Image (cartoon, rainbow, N blue to C red):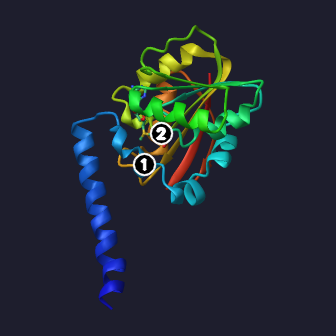
Amino acid sequence: MKTVEWLCIYFPLTLIAVHTLIRIIRYFYPFPMPHFMAALIDHPVRRRLIQPPDETAVRHGIQPGMTVLEVGPGSGTYTAAAARRVGVGGQLVAIDIEPRMIERVQFKAEREGLTNIHAEVGDVYQLNYPENHFDLCFMITVISEIPEPVRAMQEIKRVLKPGGIISFSELFLDPDYPLARTVTRWADEAGFKYKQKFGNWFCYTLIFEK
Ligand SMILES: C[S@@+](CC[C@H](N)C(=O)[O-])C[C@H]1O[C@@H](n2cnc3c(N)ncnc32)[C@H](O)[C@@H]1O
């Protein structure tokens, strides 16, 4: 009885309390996710049941042959699937502000023999690429971690080709979770056109066009 009580009442309540506390702290002190937390979010439950990488790559509008930018890959949970989807005729560039995250992405790319991944340390506010370079940019549970999301989107818009796509996936379990209408407002302010939404309130993907 005690175990059932713990599982049904105390465990969910503890999770909600910790989640709320982290949200409050991060609201006042925004900072990039520390690299040691990468394993926590690169979780099999997330990969299998909530945001499967192959399905997520398709949802984000990634097509074979595209030149794609992933901002904030973390430990690369979604990078390999996106690279497999663009195929040998395409390229996947992953940039992250945290060098240890990039090391993890490079390690995974080598382990899986994916030669079309280029991972480098970089800041979304200042992308080291020319104008009109990428077909698509995607960010998964990243945009609300960035203190100036509209500025970040404007910089991404610069490197996207005309008609290029920017896509975001968000998950309620993330302490930085933003409402879909908030991300839509940021994208609108950055000059993107709304295209499509998939998913539900708990876990959604939004697609916008340059
Ligand atoms: C919550 S993690 C998400 C990782 C991965 N996309 C996922 O869903 O598993 C957010 C990532 O964004 C990166 N990040 C935060 N601010 C950034 C910035 N200004 N430029 C580039 N990457 C940034 C962090 O270092 C971290 O790896």
**Which of the 4 image quadrants contains residue 132?**
top right
Task: Say which amino acid is labelled 2.
Answer: Ser
Q: Nearer the viewer, residue 134 or 24?
A: 134
Residue at 44% in and 20% down: 122
Taking the image as four quarters, which one is ligand 1 found in?
A: top left
**Residue labelled with disc 1:** 39
**10 Å crowding of disc 2: few (<14), some (14-19), many (20+):** many
Residue at 21% in and 38% down: 28
Q: Secondary structure at mark 1?
A: helix
Residue 205 tag number: none
* 129 versus 68 height, above or below: above
- Mark 2, ligand 1, within 8 Å: the answer is yes
Placement of the N terminus among the 4 image quadrants: bottom left
Specify whether residue 101 is in view. yes
**Residue labelled with disc 2:** 75
Residue at 36% in and 45% down: 37
Task: Say which amino acid is labelled 1.
Answer: Ala
On the rendered structure, is 38 left or right of 160?
Answer: left
Placement of the C terminus among the 4 image quadrants: top right
Q: Secondary structure at mark 2?
A: loop
Q: Residue furthest bottom?
A: 1
* 173 versus 77 height, above or below: below
* Residue 129 position in % (x across, y down): 55, 11
